Image (spheres, rainbow, N blue to C red):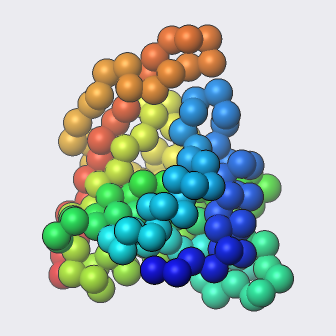
């Protein structure tokens, strides 16, 4: 997959705004571009007006990146820029991700998040449920550790 450089720029701009640096969750540009070159990874962008088709000069309000293996898909990254949160864009982008996973024949979708991630309500509202725990997976700003929660959504195709 050849990824337009302006889309990488859009992903990186949202990531820099949305992921607190103290947790070390954000990917760097090389990680993003390398993952998307693999062929089993995909991404989606959303504009501030909720459109999934961004104009050439549009700023992205959010994005997702995912990876598929056989009939399962993993949501690797999902972010909405802080200035666009609480406007329904996260729900719309997640619904689009789920719809495209279904259309691709995926049976299950997985994600992993910090235990204290405020997006937990978003995932739950779309049917994700907790299926596992990785104790001490993420670091905290003070050097402590936070558990990672693994979640699953079974897709009805």
Residue 131 screen position, x and y as percent: 21, 42
Q: Between 119 and 148, which is closer to the camera in this rendering? A: 148
Q: State left or right for residue 70 relative to residue 42.
A: left
Q: Is residue 95 visible?
A: no
Q: State left or right for residue 154 relative to residue 78.
A: left
Q: Quadrant of the N terminus?
A: bottom left
Q: Between 1 and 98, which is closer to the camera in this rendering? A: 1
Residue 151 screen position, x and y as percent: 29, 47
Q: Between 46 and 88, which is closer to the camera in this rendering? A: 46
Residue shown at the point (29%, 28%) measured from the top left? 134
Residue shown at the point (56%, 11%) measured from the top left? 143
Q: State left or right for residue 56 relative to residue 129.
A: right
Residue shown at the point (57%, 33%) measured from the top left? 24
Q: Quadrant of the C terminus?
A: bottom left
Does residue 129 lie above or below 10 as drawn? above
Does residue 117 lie above or below 45 as drawn? above
Classify residue 3 by image quadrant: bottom right
Residue shown at the point (66%, 52%) measured from the top left? 15
Classify residue 101 by image quadrant: bottom left
Residue 140 screen position, x and y as percent: 56, 19
Q: State left or right for residue 145 relative to residue 88.
A: left
Count of marks, rendered view = 0
Q: Between 111 and 7, which is closer to the camera in this rendering? A: 7
Q: Is residue 13 visible?
A: yes
Classify residue 123 by image quadrant: bottom left
């Amino acid at each position: 997959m050849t990824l337009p450089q302006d889309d990488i720029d859009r992903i990186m701009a949202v990531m820099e705004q949305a992921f607190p640096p103290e947790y070390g969750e954000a990917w760097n540009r090389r990680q993003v571009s390398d993952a998307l070159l693999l062929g089993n990874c995909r991404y989606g962008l959303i504009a501030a007006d909720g459109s999934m088709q961004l104009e050439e000069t549009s700023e992205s309000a959010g994005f997702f990146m995912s990876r598929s293996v056989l009939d399962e898909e993993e949501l690797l990254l999902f972010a909405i820029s802080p200035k666009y949160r609480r406007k329904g864009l996260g729900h719309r982008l997640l619904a689009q991700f789920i719809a495209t996973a279904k259309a691709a024949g995926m049976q299950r979708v997985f994600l992993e998040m910090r235990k204290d991630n405020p997006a937990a309500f978003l995932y739950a509202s779309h049917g994700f449920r907790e299926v596992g725990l990785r104790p001490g997976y993420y670091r905290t700003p003070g050097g402590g550790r936070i558990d990672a929660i693994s979640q699953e959504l079974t897709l009805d195709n």
